[in-house]
Image: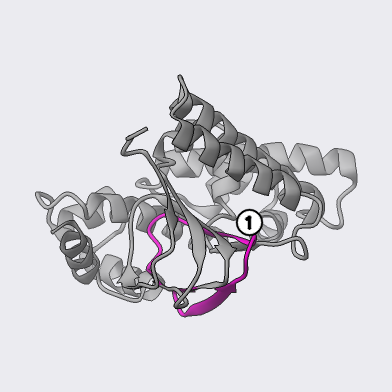
């Protein structure tokens, strides 16, 4: 199956890949020997059968040992972002994620099995393979999402019935932010919209997403700008405005803070990879 939205291959080359980025989700699954990745200053040593997820848009470098084999998965998940509940998953999937039997004992076997099923569908080129692969990928995200909700103590001091209500309310909020990131989003309006005082909203938002409201909104805007930077017909100033930044100077400063390079440098790296 040759689909631009999905690419999977066995890799046994001892090559190293300098710092780069792309707009797709990358999953690395070593089969024999380790594999190494550096993502935004963090180093990861991935052992056989461990699963490593690199979110779209993250600058990363990869290196392989002299001998080894691994599966590399690339998925365009942009279409999933239109699904109503996916915002809740994206809220915590902004950092690389290493899934091992030790770190995720309750779901590791299921996630590993889903990836192997995806690999089999891809290489056997079955009828409706692409649809099957995306259904399996959604199942994987649902598994990770439920694990995050039920095992990461999103709201540790809230009774279970209320936790479910809070998860629903915050997922609704995150969906709204993801759709309206280019507009002005203030704390008073958002906290009132889901029925919390500002004090409780700030605390609960941090518990659920692991970040502040300001950082979450900025991350949404940075992610949007990454996609727009692929369009060479748009100027940096236009991209800043379309992404919701108040000025080009603010955009440049925050982009460099979050991505460790300027928007112009980010755009140049993307173009060099296409040449």
User: Residue, x 73% and y 43% (percent of image)?
Assistant: 146
User: Residue, x 33% and y 35% (percent of image)?
Assistant: 3
The percent position of residue 130, horizontal first and vertical second, equals: 44, 28
> Start and end of the magenta stretch?
36-62
Q: As drawn, which residue projects farthest toward the left?
A: 233
The percent position of residue 40, horizontal first and vertical second, equals: 44, 74
* 161 or 190: nearer the viewer: 161
Query: Is residue 1 rendered to the left or right of residue 33?
Result: left
Task: Name above or below for residue 181 compared with residue 18.
Answer: above
* 11 or 239: nearer the viewer: 11
> In the rendered image, which quarter contains the N terminus?
top left
Residue 29 part of the magenta-drawn span: no
Task: Name above or below for residue 20 compared with residue 86.
Answer: below
User: Residue, x 56% and y 55% (percent of image)?
Assistant: 93
- Secondary structure under badge 1? helix
Toward which corner of the image does residue 58 lie, by quadrant? bottom left
Toward which corner of the image does residue 192 lie, by quadrant? top right
User: Residue, x 51% and y 78% (percent of image)?
Assistant: 42
Query: Is residue 245 rendered to the left or right of residue 143?
Result: left
Q: Is residue 145 visible?
A: no
Q: As drawn, which residue projects farthest toward the front?
A: 67
Q: Residues within 10 Å of mark 1 (few under 14, many from 20)?
A: some
> In the rendered image, which quarter contains the C terminus?
bottom left
Which residue does the numbered mark 1 point to in the structure image? 209
């Amino acid at each position: 199956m040759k689909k631009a939205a999905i690419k999977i291959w066995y890799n046994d080359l001892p090559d190293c890949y300098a710092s780069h980025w792309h707009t797709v989700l990358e999953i690395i699954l070593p089969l024999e020997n380790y594999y190494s990745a550096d993502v935004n200053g963090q180093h990861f040593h991935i052992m056989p059968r461990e699963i490593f997820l690199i979110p779209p848009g993250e600058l990363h470098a990869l290196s392989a040992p002299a001998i080894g084999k691994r599966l590399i998965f690339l998925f365009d998940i942009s279409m999933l972002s239109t699904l109503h509940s996916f915002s809740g998953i994206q809220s915590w999937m902004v950092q690389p994620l290493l899934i091992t039997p030790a770190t995720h004992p309750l779901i590791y076997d299921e996630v590993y099995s889903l990836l192997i099923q995806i690999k089999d569908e891809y290489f056997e080129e079955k009828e409706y393979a692409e649809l099957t692969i995306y259904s399996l990928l959604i199942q994987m995200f649902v598994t990770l999402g439920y694990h995050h909700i039920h095992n990461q103590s999103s709201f540790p001091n809230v009774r279970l019935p209320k936790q479910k209500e809070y998860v629903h309310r915050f997922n609704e909020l995150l969906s709204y932010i993801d759709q309206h990131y280019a507009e002005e989003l203030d704390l008073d309006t958002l906290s009132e919209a889901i029925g919390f005082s500002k004090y409780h909203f700030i605390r609960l938002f941090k518990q659920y997403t692991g970040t502040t409201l300001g950082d979450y909104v900025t991350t949404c805007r940075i992610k949007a700008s990454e996609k727009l930077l692929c369009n060479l017909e748009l100027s940096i100033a236009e991209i800043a405005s379309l992404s919701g930044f108040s000025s080009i100077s603010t955009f440049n400063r925050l982009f460099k803070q979050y991505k460790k390079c300027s928007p112009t440098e980010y755009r140049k790296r993307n173009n060099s990879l296409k040449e």
